[in-house]
Image (cartoon, helix red, strand yellow):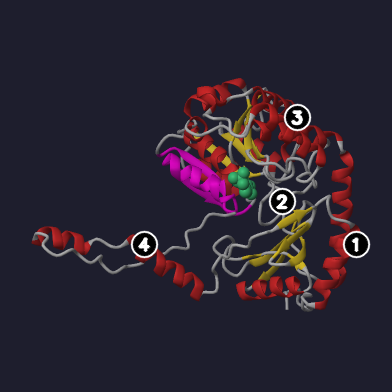
Amino acid sequence: MPWKSSRKPTRCTPASSKPNQPAAVVRAVAARPDLLQRLAVQTAERAQAQLQRRLRTIDTCQGPFVESGGQQLLAFCSNDYLGLAHDPRLVAALKTAGDESGVGSGSAHLICGHRREHAALEEALAEWTGRERALLFSTGYMANLGVIQALLERGELCVQDKLNHACLLDGAQLAGATLKRYPHADVDAAARQLHSNADGCALLATDGVFSMDGDIAPLRELAALCASERTSLMVDDAHGLGVLGEDGAGSVAEAGLSETDVPILMATLGKALGCSGAFVAGSAALIDGLTQFARTYIYTTAMPPALAAATHRAVELARSEHWRRDKLNVLLRRFRTGAAQLGLPLMPSRTAIQPLMLGDAQRALDTSRALEAQGLLAVAIRPPTVPHGQARLRITLSAAHEEAHVDRLLQALESLRLGASPTGAPV
Ligand SMILES: Cc1ncc(COP(=O)(O)O)c(C=O)c1O
């Protein structure tokens, strides 16, 4: 999700002062803006712009079906790309490890929270991604914050794709780095940004698969650029791991890039692996350094060991059950062929993320609601998550879907008459 502050500075009414306070204190207190009031104003403004985010409670979830508010919906918006989240073998691994190790890890990794389940999972992830070592983080967000803050010092250069996920951008801000963003997938522009400071340390960070667009970064070209510019390349493969590459090792493996080409590889465990958490993989020196300096690794509770055990099982299944990727690809082809026949404005993507570009935020919302009325869940993604004028339905497919599900989605989309106009623009 690209980071963009939608929160323009809003003036707010000074807080009221208490009686019997000295004049100087009253003046100072009276001038201090009330934070909660300002937040309320910003929230109201967002609602007025019809861009308010709403929370939906899911009562039950089985495969691609969810039940919410008494309605069963066929969902096309989960990141469970391989359909592993409900696999009984993962659930069994979670239960068994829970019986043995309890629920919480009880502590940070560096105190006494690092259990053998964590160590085994780290080894499995390093082996899968062809890296020397791996380090677990509790979420992908924390992994990206921690890595960038550990690597970059204040004022050093962090070059990023404009459509990078919010947490990569936030990582650069946390580090106090000089953040330079290049237009999406534009390697020449990335080179120009690097040349803006040719002498200092530099990190170039990119999503492997872009979370709201589904396309893949030009990884080979970026790796070549980074090699010639003595710049470290970091790839966030949250949406590539499990889906791309021969045994699902991700976009970096698919591009044939080694640890030397991409020294910092990060991926999440809550998407294709159907679990939760994240890891960073790379050289022993990288992992040793992160263990010392990544604050979001050091100062937080280790993920539950039973979750690590279930994730380990998920890694085994994601690697060995090739039919999941094959099935996903069959479904993707079926969806894209059907969408092309209907003239739907699908974005170019060969991954599980298949966004339907609708442009106007209200149109995206209306389309999502119309699908919901037909029992389908595909959430509208609107600004500030995506740029203005680029609201979309972020449709995702999963190996948990069947061909009949894809056909049902296509029929519903057809009924909404969303096809492109003769000029190619969505009508
Ligand atoms: C590209 C990318 N990186 C990182 C994250 C954050 O991962 P997590 O949900 O584990 O915090 C996400 C989404 O959630 C993502 O899409």
For the question of whether residue 265 can be seen, the reply is: no
Is mark 4 in CB contact (under 8 Å) with mark 2?
no
Residue 404: mark in rendering: 1
Specify whether residue 382 is painted magenta.
no
Give the mark toward the camera: 1 or 3: 1
- Residue type at tag 3: Trp
| Nearest to N terminus: mark 2 or mark 3 | 2
Give the mark toward the camera: 4 or 2: 4
Give the CA distance from mark 4 to mark 2.
Answer: 34 Å
- Residue type at tag 4: Leu
- Residue type at tag 1: Ala
Is mark 1 in CB contact (under 8 Å) with mark 3?
no
Residue under label 2: 79
Give the residue displayed 78% in from the left and 36% down from the top: 92
Residue under label 4: 36
Give the mark toward the camera: 2 or 3: 2
Give the residue displayed 70% in from the left and 24% down from the top: 120
Read off the magenta span: 155-184
| Nearest to N terminus: mark 4 or mark 1 | 4
Kind of element beneath mark 2: loop
| Nearest to N terminus: mark 3 or mark 4 | 4
Mark 2 close to ligand 1, CB under 8 Å: yes
Mark 3 close to ligand 1, CB under 8 Å: no
| Nearest to N terminus: mark 1 or mark 3 | 3
Identify whether 345 is placed above or below 329: below
